[in-house]
Image: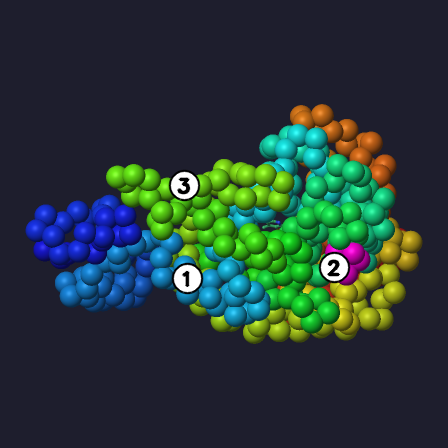
């Protein structure tokens, strides 16, 4: 019988009666199902080769051991070290997903009823779910028309004495105007959480995006530029006094360095900016960590490929003055998670709804990935009035309903990119001709 290694709780060494700490382990049959899932196929040739793999896996099983731990161990540490090296940070935390990392940052702000959090009008629900859940008030900042990122001028207007957090979102991987946002935040002593879900690897004036604010959160969900087997996030902080508590904030605030009498460990409250908080469980698996480490090593190549695709589209659209190109950036380096396709409705002879329809007819998938959050029923259910909020976000209304959609930038062939560019130019021509 194979001897299972102990985990941190039951490190019993070579006792006569060991305590196998790990629950039921994965066996060769389980692993074969994972391989079948990750490397899909069908037909006799596929089945033949899969059978060959199965034979080898079963043979390997006879001479191998299962890992001691499946959660929060050396692989997680290795992945975090890679991320720290890449971001020039210290103590970055690999969490279940980006949203759970946000929660740690929000908890650090001791967010509760009466507090206000300023988020951009256009983002994903993940940005604002926690503040809403704990009874804080969401204040929607209007967007800058060229990038659809938070507009610092409107941000300044929306600050009140109750503003506790500002959450800029680098939409599509295009960096926000962080200098202005940080200047405003410092002036009013407000915490900044960068939603860098799309922006792992983006740079703003030479600094890594996500490391400029007090906290930065990245997502490795399967739809982002890189993924840690489907889910995962990184939270980093520039608050030195909180960094030693990051890892413990991911797992209930436990400590094994100090134990309560006659027991295994102790649990502390975590120190927030204005008081303490109770940590929760946002642990990641060793498998997720293997995925993250491998893909972080590829990120620069992925961004370069996406940039080339965006540059190609911009070049194709250069002679069409009805199309506003995706900003490439002078002192910023975006990740090109999405291509922001915008039109000038006057010059195009119609708005983006017409264009979207034409593109669909030509078989080109375009999706405005993010819309005005205050339009969700959820907000209404919590007493927000969408029409009143819309009046405070006029650019968001105009840009979302009339001017923009998103195009894919990755995984397409040269022919597909060419077809997409042709279809867009043709559609705009048709609109201009009143067709
Ligand atoms: C994907 C996304 C998130 C959340 O990331 P998860 O890893 O899925 O939790 C947050 N903000 C934005 C803008 C996103 O697109």
Whole-angstrom CA distance, mark 3 to mark 1, is: 22 Å
The vertical placement of 97 against 299, above or below, is above
Q: Secondary structure at mark 2?
A: helix
Residue placed under numbered mark 2 in the picture: 178
Q: Secondary structure at mark 1?
A: helix
Would you say 42 lies left or right of 218 here?
A: left
Q: Position of residue 289 (x, y in %)?
A: 42, 59
Extent of the magenta region: 177-183
Is 234 in front, or is 56?
234
Residue found 44% across the figure and 41% down from its top: 268
Q: Nearer the viewer, mark 2 or mark 3?
A: 3
Q: Is residue 50 magenta?
A: no
> Could you tell which of marks 2 and 1 lies nearer the N-terminus?
1
Label placed on residue 267:
3
Q: Is residue 270 above or below residue 340?
A: above
157 and 259: which is toward the camera: 259
| x and y, in percent, of residue 373 in the image | 70, 40
Determine the CA span between mark 2 and mark 1. Answer: 29 Å
Q: How many marks?
A: 3
Residue 57 x/y as whole percent? 22, 63
Earlier residue among tags 3 and 1: 1
Residue 188, how many percent across, how many down?
78, 47
Q: Which residue sits at x=15%, y=66%? A: 63
Label 3, residues with CA under 10 Å away: few <14, some 14-19, many ≥20: some
Magenta residues: mostly which secondary structure? helix
Q: At 64% across and 54% down in the image, what residue appears?
A: 214
State whether residue 264 appears in this view. yes
Q: Which residue is mark 1?
A: 77
Mark nearer the N terminus (2 vs 3) = 2
Outermost residue toward the front in this view: 261
User: Whole-Å distance between the Cαs marked 2 and 3?
Assistant: 37 Å
Where residue 165 sits, quadrant-wise, is top right
């Amino acid at each position: 019988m194979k001897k299972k290694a102990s985990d941190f709780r039951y490190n019993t060494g070579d006792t006569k009666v060991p305590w196998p700490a790990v629950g039921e382990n994965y066996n060769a049959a389980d692993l074969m199902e994972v391989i079948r899932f990750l490397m899909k196929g069908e037909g006799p040739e596929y089945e033949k080769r899969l059978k060959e793999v199965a034979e080898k896996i079963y043979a390997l099983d006879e001479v191998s051991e299962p890992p001691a731990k499946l959660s929060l161990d050396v692989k997680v540490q290795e992945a975090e070290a890679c991320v720290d090296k890449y971001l020039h940070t210290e103590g970055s935390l690999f969490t279940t997903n980006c949203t759970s990392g946000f929660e740690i940052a929000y908890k650090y702000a001791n967010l509760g009823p009466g507090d206000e959090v300023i988020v951009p009008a256009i983002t994903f629900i993940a940005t604002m779910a926690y503040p809403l859940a704990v009874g804080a008030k969401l204040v929607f900042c209007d967007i800058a028309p060229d990038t659809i990122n938070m507009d610092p001028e409107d941000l300044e207007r929306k600050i009140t004495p109750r503003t506790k957090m500002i959450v800029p979102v680098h939409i599509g991987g295009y960096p926000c105007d962080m200098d202005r946002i940080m200047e405003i935040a410092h002036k009013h002593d407000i915490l900044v959480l960068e939603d860098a879900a799309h922006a792992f690897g983006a740079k703003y004036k030479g600094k890594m995006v996500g490391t400029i604010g007090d906290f930065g959160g990245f997502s490795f969900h399967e739809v982002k530029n890189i993924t840690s087997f489907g889910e995962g996030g990184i939270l980093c902080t520039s608050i030195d006094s909180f960094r030693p508590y990051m890892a413990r904030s991911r797992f209930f605030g436990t400590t094994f360095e100090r134990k309560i009498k006659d027991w295994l460990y102790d649990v502390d409250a975590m120190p927030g900016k204005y008081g303490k908080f109770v940590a929760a469980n946002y642990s990641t698996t060793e498998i997720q960590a293997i995925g993250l480490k491998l893909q972080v090593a590829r990120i620069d190549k992925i961004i370069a490929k996406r940039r080339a695709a965006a540059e190609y589209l911009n070049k194709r659209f250069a002679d069409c003055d009805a199309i506003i190109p995706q900003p490439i950036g002078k002192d910023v380096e975006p990740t090109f998670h999405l291509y922001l396709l915008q039109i000038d409705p006057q010059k195009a002879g119609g708005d983006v709804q017409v264009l979207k329809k034409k593109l669909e007819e030509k078989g080109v998938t375009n999706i405005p990935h993010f819309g005005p959050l205050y339009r969700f029923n959820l907000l209404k259910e919590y007493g927000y009035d969408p029409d009143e909020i819309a009046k405070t976000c006029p650019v968001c209304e105009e840009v979302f309903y009339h001017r923009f959609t998103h195009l894919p930038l990755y995984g397409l062939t040269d022919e597909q990119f060419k077809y997409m560019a042709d279809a867009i130019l043709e559609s705009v021509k048709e609109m201009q001709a009143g067709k």
